[in-house]
Amino acid sequence: SMPEITLLEKRLPYIRMANAKLQSEIAAESHVCEKTIRNLENANANPTLKTLNCIAASFHMSVSAFLKLDLSPALMTDLSLKYEGGSPEILIPEILTLSRWLIVFLSFSGETQQDFSDHTGVGLDTVNRIKRHLPSCNPTLSTLQNFAAYMSITVSELLDTTLSEDDMRKMLEERIRS
């Protein structure tokens, strides 16, 4: 039911080995503790967006590319998008994208933040913080999965910083109205 967790379990060791890196090296480069890397590779973790950003950035990938469900492993190594990210203190671009998705979805659906919170099981405080894209915002993968599932999109799409608000609206129209 949570495809991204299974995907991380398979993808992380694959990309790591394709880059000839040990778990300890990824930990050092991404500033994520080795135990977390190990837990992710064992599908035993619910990483935050900033953790995912740090790990993806250590492979020069965006979180969106890192979590694309339909990417073949060979393609994935080619698609490494020389992406600079990884500092957990700064507002990462994905948070702004998440905020825009939320605003577009609320306007599209006519729902309040409270409705959205009730339907996704994500606390109202978290929904508010994401909508206001506060730098302290650091949703977990399961929160991102709940958001995406409720909006009928993938986590990769939810974090795709290349999408305009217009693109988002069109995607919602295609998926929700059909």
Image (spheres, grey):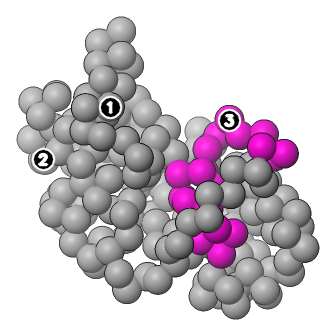
Above or below, comparing residue 27 to residue 19 in the picture: below
Answer with mark 1 or mark 3, whichever residue precedes in sequence. 3
Residue identified by numbered label 1: 167
Residue 163 appearing in the image: yes
| Residue 128 on the magenta span | no
Q: Amino acid at mark 1?
A: Asp
Task: Judge left or right: residue 21 versus residue 151.
Answer: right
Residue identified by numbered label 2: 114
Answer with mark 1 or mark 2, whichever residue precedes in sequence. 2
Instruction: Name the spot of residue 29 as percent of width and height, x first.
Output: 68, 86
The residue mark sitting in front, 1 or 2, is 1
Label 1 to label 3, Cα distance in Å?
20 Å
44 or 47, which lies in front? Answer: 47
* Callout 3: SS: loop
| Residue 71 on the magenta span | yes
The local crowd at label 2, few if under 14, some if 14 to 19, many if 20 or more residues have their Cα within 10 Å, is some
Label 1 to label 2, Cα distance in Å?
25 Å
* Callout 2: SS: helix
Badges 1 and 2: C-beta atoms under 8 Å apart? no
Q: In the rendered picture of this protein, how many numbered marks are placed on residues?
A: 3
Q: Quadrant of the C terminus?
A: top left
Q: Residue at horizontal 30%, vertical 23%?
A: 170
Label 3 to label 2, Cα distance in Å?
33 Å
Magenta region: 56-75
Residue identified by numbered label 3: 70
Q: Amino acid at mark 3?
A: Asp
The residue mark sitting in front, 3 or 2, is 3
Q: Amino acid at mark 2?
A: Gln
